[in-house]
Amino acid sequence: MHIRDLAIIDTLELELAQGMTVLTGETGAGKSILIDALGLVLGDRADSSMVREGAEKAEISVTLALPETHSIPAWLQTQGMEAEETCILRRSISRDGKSRAWINGTPATRQNLQTLSEWLVDIHGQHAHQSLLRQDMQRQVLDAYAAHKTLLEHTASAHAHWQQLHAELSQRQARQADQQARREWVALQLAELHALGISADELRELNQEHHRLAHAQTLLTAAQGAYALLSVGEHSIERGLHQAHALLGEAAGFDPTLAAMTQNLSEALIHINEAVQNLGRYLDRLELDPARLAWIEQRLAEIHSLARTHQRNPAELLDLQEILSSELAALDAHTHDLKALTQAAAQAEQDYLSHAQALSQSRTLHAARLETAVTEAMQGLGMPGGCFAIELSPLSRERFSPLGLDALSFCVSANPGLAPRPLAKVASGGELSRISLAIQMVAAHVLATPTLIFDEVDAGIGGAVAEIVGRQLRALGEHRQVLCVTHLPQVAAQAHHHLHVSKQHRNGQTHTQLRSLDEAERIEELARMLGGIDITEQTLAHAREMRHSSTKHPHVGNCVKRF
């Protein structure tokens, strides 16, 4: 971590090792400024008054190692940022109040910093970054403590399936009213077409018959006249041809050249006879039928009228009937599918509720166990009579989620006789830190935040309780990176590493200095914290005993009973 021109800090570099590190120093030396600086680079709101007097801007940067199995690199890529093994956060605050931020050299928003930092650093104390204050993190703690990963996966999968079917059903239902109206219209048009009952060749045949009946008188007159000319009376064409054929037949015996003409007349007589016979049969069939003509005209009028209604040619009515029949079948199939989809969505909801209710039961069971464990831990952290409770309440149907049916809230009572209140409303920063420490210790094996910072964790405690707090922090440091700002030697003695903050005055200005203490310096600092200004040999001996005692208890996980 690098800080420049922030408050009373001109330039300061801090590198934290793995394990528990304590930060000590006199009041006002700048310990809280370090936590504030970290808060700024993690996304806290900036204030231009924090810029060092005489400087134009303050800058803070921090390099964070990324957990190997975390999804942070994928998130960085979605934000258009470089994904590396480490993540560099940088923040600048100008004298004019402007603030800028970068992640791995790429400009970022304050919200980007907050999102990323919540995966990597957890500040416990009177600061906004404490993730345990958020209900989503509280739920994650309980779910991780309960170790019901399979239940969570089944619930999320069932919820996704239900929501997919529900969305499809909603879309279809939204279209259902229009489709029902369309179906009624199509059915009505089909009923009219079916009632008309037109067949494939009917229109052509009706038009032909209508044309014939409409001109029946003309046809009758022509056929009768032709029939009379051909075969009726002494002067008919048929009689004349017979006479001519007889005359030429007799004469052909005297002149062979007439034989060919006689043959021609024979052929003509054959054709004339055939024509006369056909005309006779035609006249037998031909008759005037006004009633039939009127019926045909009415039928054609009905066909043309329905064609005009559909803006089609009469010949296209049969094609229209087939089109409407296909559409009606499709609409009926949709109605059937809608019923099946409704049943499937209802079943999917029941499947989700089954998994979610099993998840709720598991949460209820393990919530009681976590309550007992954290409450017991609180007793050993200077909060006798305090208790920890987890409120689980059902969500309304509109708020059902992949995470189940439960609204969850961590609640605490720091003193006997007081009803538990939500953790986020606990007033005392020291109490909040110790409660968070108790939760961290009980659930240490399931929480994944790699860096934990405890500010004012020792407020209002001392003696044996302070030593227990120190041991608990050291135990956390066995698996996490822990930074603790403390005034208590009992806590400082337990740390793996010790940093000291002091103030110096140069050229009329106050400067903050930070240095890592070796073992001898740690004994002296513990003695100062124990005895104040005058450090006696007895005080130094006490400090040595504290350090010696801390090395005898490197693992203190049994300080909190596990359930």
Image (cartoon, helix red, strand yellow):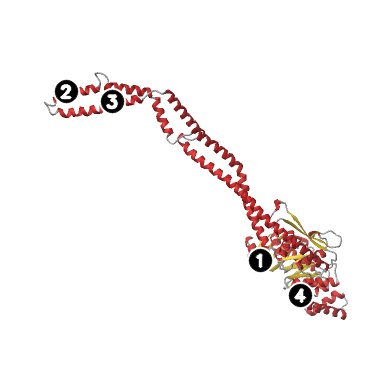
Q: Secondary structure at mark 2?
A: helix
Q: Are marks 2 and 3 in contact (CB under 8 Å)?
A: no
Q: Find the distance from the CA under tag 2 to the CA under tag 3.
A: 23 Å
Q: Nearer the viewer, mark 4 or mark 1?
A: 4
Residue 175 picture location, percent across and down: 60, 44
Q: Find the distance from the CA under tag 1 to the CA under tag 3.
A: 107 Å
Q: Are marks 2 and 1 in contact (CB under 8 Å)?
A: no
**Which quarter of the image is occupied by the C terminus?**
bottom right
Residue 531 picture location, percent across and down: 87, 75
Residue 350 vertical position relative to residue 191 in the rendered view, above or below: below
Q: Residue furthest left?
A: 254
Q: Secondary structure at mark 3?
A: helix
Q: Which residue is mark 1?
A: 70
Q: Nearer the viewer, mark 2 or mark 1?
A: 2
Q: Find the distance from the CA under tag 4 to the CA under tag 3.
A: 132 Å
552, 544: nearer the viewer: 552
Task: Using the rendered image of the protein, determine whether residue 504 is visible from the camera's viewpoint.
Answer: no
Q: Amino acid at mark 1?
A: His
Counting residues from the N terminus, which is met first, the one under dot 4 or under dot 2?
A: 2
78, 240: nearer the viewer: 240
Q: Which residue is mark 2?
A: 247
Q: Amino acid at mark 2?
A: Leu
Q: Residue at x 33, y 26 (%)?
A: 282
Q: Which residue is mark 4?
A: 555
Counting residues from the N terminus, which is met first, the one under dot 2 or under dot 3?
A: 2
Answer with left or right where residue 102 lies relative to residue 516: left
Q: Which residue is mark 3?
A: 276
**Is the residue marked by circle 3 packed among few (<14), some (14-19), or many (20+) residues within 10 Å?**
many
